[in-house]
Structures are given as C-alpha cells and as structure tokens.
Amino acid sequence: MTREEKSQVIKDLTAQLADTSTIYLTDISGLDAGTTSNLRRACFKANVSLSVVKNTLLAKAMESSDKDFGDLPQVLKGNTSIMISETGNAPAKVIKEFRKKSEKPLLKGAFIDEAIYVGDENLEALANIKSKDEVIGDIIGLLQSPAKNVVSALKSGGGKIAGILKTLSEKEG
C-alpha cells in the first residue's frame, strides 16, 4: 500500500468516525469464510456496517478525529474489525445473537455517544442500552398513561360536572 493510499484510508476512516456516534471494535479472527459471510449478513440485516481495518491506520484516524476515544486505541492489537451503526445497541445485539453459535466476534471496545467501553465483559450492558427510539417510546408511553387514566375516569363519571369534579378530586388524593 502506497503512502497516498494509506493517507486516503486514514481520511476515509476519520470521516466515518466523525459521521457516527456508535463504533464497536471487535475481533473476528479465526472465523471461516461461511461464518464470516453469515456475520456480514446479520450485520446487514441489523443496519450495521462491518469492515476489517488495519490497527495503525485506525489509530491515526482516531488521533485525527475531533472525538476523544480515551483508552480505545490501546485495544488495537491483533485482528480488528469495526462495526458502525446509527443505533447504539445494534452491534451488541448482533454480536450477542451471533455468539449463540460461535465464540466470536469478541468485543474489544466501543464508543457510544462519547461513552467508552473497553472489554468483552461490557457486551451484556451494551446490548441492554436503549436506542433513542426506544427511549422516546417509553417517554411517550409514560406521558400518555396519566392522560388515558383521566379520560377514562371522566367517561365513567358520565361526563356530568359532578362526575368530573369527583374524578378530579380522587386524582388529587
């Protein structure tokens, strides 16, 4: 690889790092072609980008980035693959599901919304992180619940002023 090609790869990786807030570093070494193909298919279905990177080039891209990757450059040893997604827990869910049949991929580290996770022992916690859409859904559900209770109580009170006042006084107590 020429110096110009390396420089271009670093620029491309730096741009990828800048455009996402969810980056997982994994080890998929030792997977045969069929298993690797299955992993790539699982990633594609989950809208996760998977690519193998050279550690030195990724380290330089991390240095060039405006983001603080903390201890993540230290895990760039051996075989490293990068998983990028719009959803914070999607790569962890893919890894967790895939490891029901295989011992890899191993999680080396992750960068999610400026939080840094180092080590495979964080996989369960990362898989349980709620996506923005899930959090928004929970908030909407919580906000709708009291309103639904009041509306149903008002309907059961017959809609008369006395029933409405009775329902409201019960809600205050």
Image (cartoon, rainbow, N blue to C red):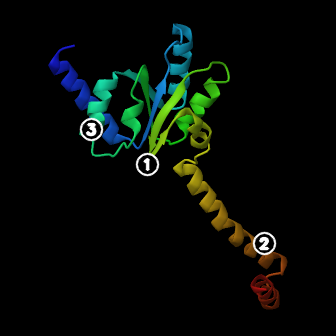
Q: Farthest residue toward the top?
A: 33
Q: Residue 24: x, y in percent?
A: 46, 34
Q: Earlier in the sequence, mark 1 or mark 2?
A: 1
User: Considering only vertical position in the picture, is 33 above or below 58?
Assistant: above
Q: Secondary structure at mark 3?
A: helix
Report the residue at 62% width, 44% height from top: 128
Say which residue label 2 marks. Answer: 152
Which residue is nearer to you in this view: 158 or 33?
33
Disc 3 or 2, which lies upstream in sequence? 3
SS of the residue under disc 2: helix
Q: Residue at x 60, y 43 (%)?
A: 125
Q: Which residue is mark 1?
A: 113
Relative placement, left or right, of 91 versus 142 is left
- Report the amino acid beneath label 3: Glu
Residue at 21% x, 21% y is: 6
Say which residue appears at 19% left-offset and 25% top-offset.
7
Q: Are marks 3 and 2 in contact (CB under 8 Å)?
A: no
Q: Are marks 1 and 2 in contact (CB under 8 Å)?
A: no
Kindly state the secondary structure of the residue where label 1 is placed. Answer: loop
Q: Amino acid at mark 2?
A: Ser
Instruction: Count residues near mark 3 (Cα–Cα under 10 Å), then give few for <14, some for 14-19, many for 20+.
Output: some
Residue 33 lies, with reference to residue 15, above or below; the image says: above
Q: Amino acid at mark 1?
A: Asp
Q: How far is the residue under mark 3 from the one under mark 2? A: 57 Å
Q: Quadrant of the N terminus?
A: top left
Quadrant of the rendering where the C terminus is positioned:
bottom right
- The numbered disc on residue 63 is 3
Please state which of the two labelled residues, at mark 1 or mark 2, is closer to the viewer: 1
Going from the N terminus, do you reach mark 3 or mark 1 first? 3
User: Which of labels 3 and 2 is toward the front?
Assistant: 3
Please name whichever residue, 24 or 55, is drawn nearer the observer in this view of the structure.
55
